[in-house]
Amino acid sequence: MTDEKAITGEDIYEALKDVYDPEIPVNVVDLGLIYDCAVENGDVNVTMTLTFPGCGMGPQIAQQAEWRIAEIDGVGDVSVEIVHDPPWNPDMITEDGKIALGMD
């Protein structure tokens, strides 16, 4: 028996709350940019989007997400894929995100 805790999607989402779009003061989770997170044997695959397809900050945001996930003890390989389907829209912002943006 090992003391090592299995990594969960919840662990990944919690870590991704430390990743921000530099142009918007809300984390990528509360912006609704994370579409999927899969964890298998410590390897993590995240599918995310951007607020608009031509966002020049996309590669930087994805890299920050990869780095932040890699900091979690027990994580193996990390893959962050940016997709644009379905397109992001403001309805995807969480209640916490709306409050942070003054949209409540």
Image (cartoon, grey):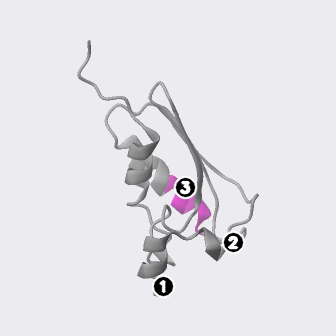
Residue 89 located left or right of residue 100:
right
Q: Position of residue 78 (x, y in %)?
A: 51, 38
Q: Secondary structure at mark 1?
A: loop
Quadrant housing residue 88: bottom right
Which of labels 2 and 1 is toward the front? Answer: 1
Q: Residue furthest left?
A: 3
Mark 3 is surrounded, within 10 Å at the Cα level, by few (under 14), some (14 to 19) or many (20 or more) other residues, namely many
Q: Residue furthest bottom?
A: 102
Q: Nearer the viewer, residue 54 or 104?
A: 104
Q: CA distance from mark 3 to mark 2?
A: 14 Å
- The amino acid sitting under disc 3 is Ala
Q: CA distance from mark 2 to mark 1?
A: 22 Å
User: Badge 3 is on which residue?
Assistant: 62
Label 2 vs 1, first from the N-terminus: 2
Quadrant housing residue 96: bottom left
The residue sitting at 51% across, 78% down in the picture is 23
Mark 2 is surrounded, within 10 Å at the Cα level, by few (under 14), some (14 to 19) or many (20 or more) other residues, namely few
Q: Which residues are magenta?
A: 57-63
Label 3 vs 2, first from the N-terminus: 2
- The amino acid sitting under disc 1 is Asp
Label drawn at residue 52: 2
